[in-house]
Amino acid sequence: MSGGWNTIESDAGVFTYLVDNLGVKDVQFEELVALDPEYLKQQSPVYGVIFLFKYPTGEKPTDSPRDGTFDFEAAENLFFASQTIQNACGTQALLSVLLNKDGVLDIGSQLRDFKDFTGAFPSELRGEALSNSELIRDVHNSFARASPFVDETQRTASDDDDAYHFIAYTPINNTLYELDGLQPAPISHGPCTFSDFPEKVIPVLQRRINRYPANEIRFNLLAMVRDLRIRAREIGDQDMLYREEQKRNAWQWENALRRHNFVGFVSEVLKGVVRAKLREGDGAYEKWVEEAVGKMKTRIEERGKKGGGGGEEDL
């Protein structure tokens, strides 16, 4: 029985240092802000993309995907694992790209050993092996936000939660594949070379997004690319190298903050504010509380009008 997995954010800094801590060399993630093939080409070489979307929980399983075709034979010739545990989909999606790029990328000895060990397994057993990998689970959980009130490793999604899901798109053996551990097999989207990938994947992503209402904007797209510092050094662009180093420093700082529990700090600040309001007298404290309650009610009403759920959960 595997230990629990926490939710991680769809964030370039989180994913970059996650793969770095797994032993992968010369890879980083970049957030894509436009569905534009030319924009994606600017990040080349692009090994794959990780797509985060709100999962349609009411959608019934079908014998064929809504876009593309199931390729059951491909599961024998590439790394594809079924998702067998909640909250693991982010790391599973990036591994779906990495473990299909061994030889193109230096994935490190530990992931290579995992790939070799699971190579002859069916997808269900690969998923179980991934869920039970202490190395992968511990690295994954090290990037989760500190939660002093809820143990996400023991929590299951409720009907009130907004469920989100990560999947991967990557070219393998001259075919564009969608790798989703909740599906029974890889999904083929037709012929695609490594160089064609930016042009071929964008229409597939656009069709996926078009399934949702026009006011649905909760999507995120990360590209797995070569470490941009390498390009900066190759072309002698010192300004680009400086920007990339500064970006890495910011990512490390943000990742450190994610691990910190700020409840004690917030508690002390709140105590100080309460003492100050009580010293003011003339009902200042009661007025402050009343105003805060009113603002919170307004926010809840606005969230309800927008269709916001009671929480967020990865599948």
Image: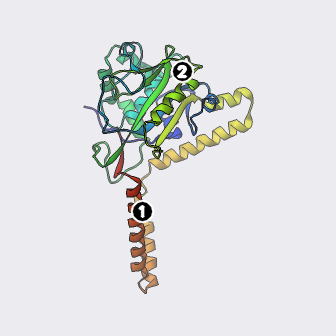
- In the displayed structure, 14 sits above or below 67; it is below
Quadrant for the N terminus in the image: top left
| Numbered disc 2: secondary structure | loop
**Horizontal arrangement in the rendering, residue 158 relative to residue 88 (left or right):** left
Q: Quadrant of residue 86?
A: top left
Residue in the picture at 32% in, 50% down: 150
Which quadrant of the view contains residue 180? top left
Tally the marks. 2
- For the question of whether residue 101 can be seen, the reply is no
User: Is residue 229 placed above or below 174 in the rendered structure?
Assistant: below
Residue that carries the numbered disc 1 in the rendered image = 299
| Residue receiving disc 2 | 105
Q: Closer to the observer: label 1 or label 2?
A: 1
Q: Secondary structure at mark 1?
A: helix
Q: Position of residue 264 (x, y in %)?
A: 40, 61
Q: Residue at x 31, y 47 (%)?
A: 151
Left or right of 281 on screen, residue 63? left
Residue extending furthest bottom? 282
